[in-house]
Image (cartoon, coloured by chain):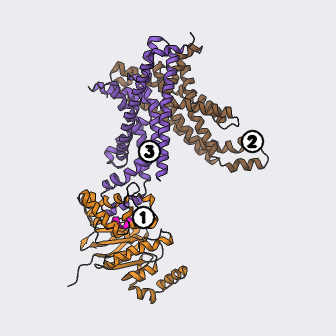
């Protein structure tokens, strides 16, 4: 018996006017799977990720979350209800954290559960404490975002997403905006999630991290998936010329 | 809405609008003079002048224009100043507007890069020459829009002469509200005339601003 | 007729009472204008077009006409439709509405200036458009706008003198009452000016303090 995939994307396409940013991309992500998406800037990888929860809706193709279509065409009011419910199941972490500056760490983590899950204050507090403990930020629960380092902010942002108990987590260059010495603490949290078999889609430019943690790597360029496979193959024996070029530049640049 | 009534009172409103325009123009001219003097005082090297400039701004912005006007019009005769209501309106409102314009003009002058003065001084210009030939021409451009905002406020402030019975727009609207019991129509009529005046001034300011940018 | 400031002596009580009313009007109208400003901003930005366009017209009319004219409209207009409010209430409503329109401009700009990522983050947790606005965007906008709204409140203090014209017994009208008994306009208007100036300085001090606190918390 094959289990239903968590995410299934068929023939995703997106264009702004004449500019095609995504061309016919299909992807299936199974429960517990960790998929990295790499590629040069402007390759469409972030757009692709942001299409999954309809932040940037596709112009063509279909997205399914556990068999339910995400990008359904519905009357505005019904669509709003539908997408709000779907988004609770899809956690997302942004490059620039996007923590709510007017709320404490606790307020950031509890806002969603409090408004959407109908939990009591005691329950959301407990939930926040669990999640913050998980990312090692429990001591900072009453701090404001402005009092945290970038790495700490990102860990709180991860806890905020996890507090909704999502079925899948999307990471959009979660470490790109961090000072180099702060990257590791965020990577450690993500590795821990991987060990716990959280399903994850990770847009990243950290090749080392993709290689160590991910089950599968997609290389995207100019709106298409150029090459896809296990990290060992993609990083050691890429078959495509464009992949080789990209990796050569990227690995040189880092050493 | 009673259009017959509006037609009857319209000529009176139009005449009143003309008084409002006249008041606004004279007030604006006096305001610009006071504002320029105020800014010069605030930027002067003399400590006494700087203090006087700051006191002018603080006192006239820190108290209601209506009180200033009443003090001048009703209290003036006690210290030998006899003015009719219109004159008191122009002087009271003009000096008040000047306090706001002082800050606008000073702000624009300060906003011109310090390096500009230094460059002018290094080629041997005097302080005054640098101000007149280098700083002011640049500051003029910066101050057109904010002065437009001051003038917009000043046009609305001309309504303050209504309580001292200058027959301008607000006084006229008030009188006809009292005699016709049609507050909404009278408000709308006066309101549209105010809007026309303010939008026309906005046009002129926009035109000057564009012209200054090209030059 | 020279000046004689000893006439003030018997009227300090009246003037101070007037000052208290002026402060009360300023505070009440100030709060009203802040709350009204948020509501107006939301209407101006997010209401359906049938509401938005008439509202924009109302806004233009209120920004383009003198406060005094608006006070006449509200005071006499309400009487005409059978609502006979005390002058004090009409004055607070008039001042509050007038400044709400100005505050609304500031708050609209602040709402639009809240980083787009904030709405995105709220929406990705599953918050609805309205929840994101109410719990994430508006709380940030109303904080960002505190310093410029402080300026409007200080302007409101001085414009509150205008409600004397519709018969609200605040500082200006108190001075006029004293004048009608003593025929000493210069002394009493000057005294009123001094009292306004003191309240004004107090408000400026409070504003500076709030601004410092905001600056420190960033």
x, y (%) of residue A127?
28, 64
Residue B127's label in the rendered image is 2
Q: Secondary structure at mark 2?
A: helix
Q: Is residue C40 left or right of residue C207?
A: left
Q: Which residue is mark 1?
A: A153
Name the residue rendered at 67%, 32% in the picture.
B49
Q: Quadrant of residue B9?
A: top left
Q: For the view shown, which residue lies furthest in the front direction?
A: A139
Do badges 3 and 2 share one subunit?
no
Q: Is residue B51 above or below residue C185?
A: below
Foreground: disc 1 or disc 2: 1
Residue B81's label in the rendered image is none
User: Taking the image as drawn, is residue B19 in sight?
Assistant: no
Q: Secondary structure at mark 3?
A: helix
User: Taking the image as drawn, is residue C161 in sight?
Assistant: yes
x, y (%) of residue A85?
26, 63
Chain identifier for the orange-coloured part of the image: A
Chain identifier for the brown-coloured part of the image: B
In the rendered structure, the residue with mark 3 lies on which chain?
A: C
Q: Is residue A62 above or below residue A83?
A: below
């Amino acid at each position: 018996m094959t289990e239903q995939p968590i995410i299934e994307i068929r023939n995703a396409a997106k264009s702004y006017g004449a500019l095609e940013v995504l061309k016919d991309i299909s992807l299936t992500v199974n429960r517990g799977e960790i998929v990295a998406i790499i590629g040069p800037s402007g390759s469409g990888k972030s757009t692709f990720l942001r299409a999954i929860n309809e932040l940037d809706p596709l112009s063509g193709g279909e997205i399914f979350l556990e068999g339910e279509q995400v990008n359904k065409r519905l009357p505005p009011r019904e669509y709003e209800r539908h997408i709000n419910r779907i988004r609770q199941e899809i956690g997302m972490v942004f490059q620039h954290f996007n923590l709510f500056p007017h709320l404490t760490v606790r307020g950031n983590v509890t806002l969603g559960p409090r408004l959407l899950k109908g939990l009591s204050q005691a329950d959301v507090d407990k939930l926040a404490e669990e999640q913050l403990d998980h990312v090692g930020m429990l001591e900072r629960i009453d701090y404001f975002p402005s009092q945290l380092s970038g790495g700490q902010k990102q860990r709180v942002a991860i806890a905020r997403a996890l507090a909704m108990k999502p079925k899948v987590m999307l990471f959009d260059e979660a470490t790109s905006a961090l000072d180099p010495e702060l990257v590791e603490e965020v990577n450690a949290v993500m590795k821990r999630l991987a060990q716990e078999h959280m399903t994850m889609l990770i847009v990243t430019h950290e090749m080392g991290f993709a290689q160590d943690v991910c089950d599968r790597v997609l290389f995207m360029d100019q709106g298409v998936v150029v090459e896809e496979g296990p990290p060992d193959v993609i990083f050691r024996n890429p078959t495509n010329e464009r992949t080789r070029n990209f990796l050569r530049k990227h690995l040189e640049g880092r050493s | 809405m009673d259009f017959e009534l509006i037609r009857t009172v319209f000529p009176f409103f139009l005449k009143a609008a003309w008084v409002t325009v006249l008041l606004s123009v004279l007030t604006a001219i006096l305001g610009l003079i006071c504002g320029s003097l105020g800014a010069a005082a605030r930027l002067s090297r003399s400590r006494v002048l700087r203090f006087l400039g700051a006191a002018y701004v603080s006192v006239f912005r820190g108290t209601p224009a209506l009180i200033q006007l009443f003090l001048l019009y009703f209290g003036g005769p006690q210290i030998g100043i006899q003015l009719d209501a219109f004159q008191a309106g122009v002087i009271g409102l003009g000096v008040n507007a000047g306090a706001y314009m002082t800050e606008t003009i000073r702000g624009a002058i300060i906003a011109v890069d310090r390096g500009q003065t230094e460059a002018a001084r290094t080629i041997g210009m005097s302080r005054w020459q640098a101000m007149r030939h280098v700083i002011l021409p640049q500051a003029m451009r910066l101050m057109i829009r904010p002065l437009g905002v001051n003038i917009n406020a000043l046009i609305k402030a001309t309504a303050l002469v209504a309580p001292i019975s200058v027959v301008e727009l607000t006084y006229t609207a008030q009188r006809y509200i009292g005699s016709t019991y049609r507050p909404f129509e009278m408000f709308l009529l006066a309101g549209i005339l105010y809007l026309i005046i303010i939008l026309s001034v906005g046009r002129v300011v926009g035109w000057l601003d564009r012209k200054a940018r090209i030059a | 007729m020279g000046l004689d400031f000893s006439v003030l002596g018997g009227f300090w009580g009246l003037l101070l009472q007037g000052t208290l009313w002026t402060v009360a009007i300023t505070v009440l109208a100030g709060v009203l204008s802040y709350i009204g400003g948020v509501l107006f901003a939301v209407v101006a930005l997010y209401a359906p077009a049938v509401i938005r366009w008439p509202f924009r017209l109302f806004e233009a009319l209120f920004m383009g006409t003198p406060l005094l004219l608006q006070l006449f409209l509200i005071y006499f207009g309400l009487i005409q439709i059978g609502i006979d409010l005390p002058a004090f209430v009409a004055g607070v409503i008039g001042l509050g509405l007038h400044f709400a329109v100005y505050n609304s401009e500031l708050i609209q700009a602040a709402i639009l200036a809240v980083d787009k990522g904030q709405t995105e983050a709220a929406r990705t947790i599953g918050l609805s458009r309205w929840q994101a606005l109410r719990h994430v965007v508006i709380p940030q906008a109303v904080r960002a706008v505190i310093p410029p709204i402080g300026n409007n409140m200080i302007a409101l203090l001085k414009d509150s003198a205008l409600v004397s014209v519709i018969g609200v017994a605040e500082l200006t009208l108190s001075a006029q009452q004293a004048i009608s008994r003593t025929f000493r306009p210069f002394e009493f208007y000057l005294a009123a000016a001094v009292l306004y100036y003191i309240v004004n300085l107090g408000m400026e001090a409070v504003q500076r303090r709030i601004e410092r606190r905001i600056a420190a918390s960033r």
